[in-house]
Image (cartoon, helix red, strand yellow):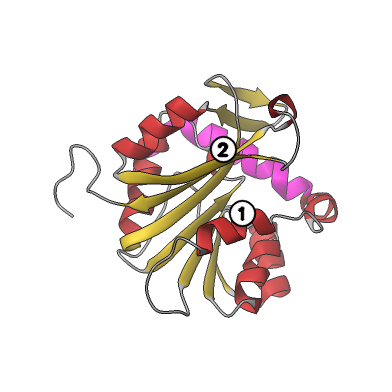
Amino acid sequence: MPKSDPLNQISQTTLAHYEARAEEFWLGTRDHDVSQNIAALLRHIEGVAPFQILDFGCGPGRDLKTFCELGYIAVGLEGATRFAEMARDHSGCEVWQQDFLALDLPAGRFDGVYANASLFHVPRAALPQVLAQLHATLKPGGVLFASNPRGQNEEGWNGERYGSYHDLAAWRRYMEAAGFAELEHYYRPQGLPREQQPWLASVWRRATPPQGDQSR
């Protein structure tokens, strides 16, 4: 999709933040336990393994490497140059460097898309198009996992990073409009009161063409 100047500025400023702090980010996140999220994606994928997985916003490659070690065919996608380099080195996997607002994805390739802490950086104005592109890159019946910091549907800058913070009802509307059917959702971290669970995780199946698009 053509990027307007405001959207381009949002994307470039957010990516620059990560470029400048790549090593610091890696040290702070490399030991995070997201096995619950990986399992949530994998248990809903149907078909014959090894599955094709797109790690959307793979960062330095922590989870990308895990998918490979589990025996899956994993490809990373990352907008920040330094993160893409780190992910290739850490995982040994193919990593595509693409801006979320200028995606070029193959149609019907992946059994699963794993979007852990990435889609919240997409402004609401661009989210329907990005979700439509993820829908199209999944095989029929493919599965999308997303985990994002939740909120009250506000969006804006947090320092040099832009974020959109959806509640469950709003997130459902975006996903269903993009042609996804909900499989499950939960809040993280596990075992804490809801007010101490800032992350909303959800799993979706590619079900129908996006609303207004009957070409698929």
Q: Quadrant of residue 201?
A: top right
Name the image quarter holding the N terminus. Answer: top left
Kindly identify the amino acid type of the residue bearing the numbered disc 1: Asn
Is 208 within the magenta? no
The residue sitting at 45% across, 62% down in the picture is: 112
**Residue closest to the eye, 8 or 60:** 60
Identify the magenta region. Answer: 1-21
- Residue 70 on image: x %, y %: 62, 76
Q: Quadrant of residue 95?
A: bottom right
Which of pointers 2 and 1 indicates the residue nearer the eye? 1
Kindly identify the amino acid type of the residue bearing the numbered disc 2: His
> Which numbered disc, 2 or 1, marks the residue that appears first in the sequence?
1
Q: Residues within 10 Å of mark 1 (few under 14, many from 20)?
A: many
Q: Which dot marks residue 37?
A: 1
Report the residue marked by disc 2. 121
Q: Is residue 74 above or below residue 164?
A: below
Left or right for 14, reference 208: right
Is there a contact, CB below 8 Å, between mark 2 and mark 1? no
Count all numbered tags in the image, as a single digit: 2
**Residue closest to the eye, 105 or 48:** 48
Name the image quarter holding the C terminus. Answer: bottom left
* Magenta stretch, overall SS: helix
- Residue 200 on image: x %, y %: 59, 37
Q: Secondary structure at mark 1?
A: helix
Q: CA distance from mark 2 to mark 1?
A: 19 Å
- Residue 206 on image: x %, y %: 32, 53
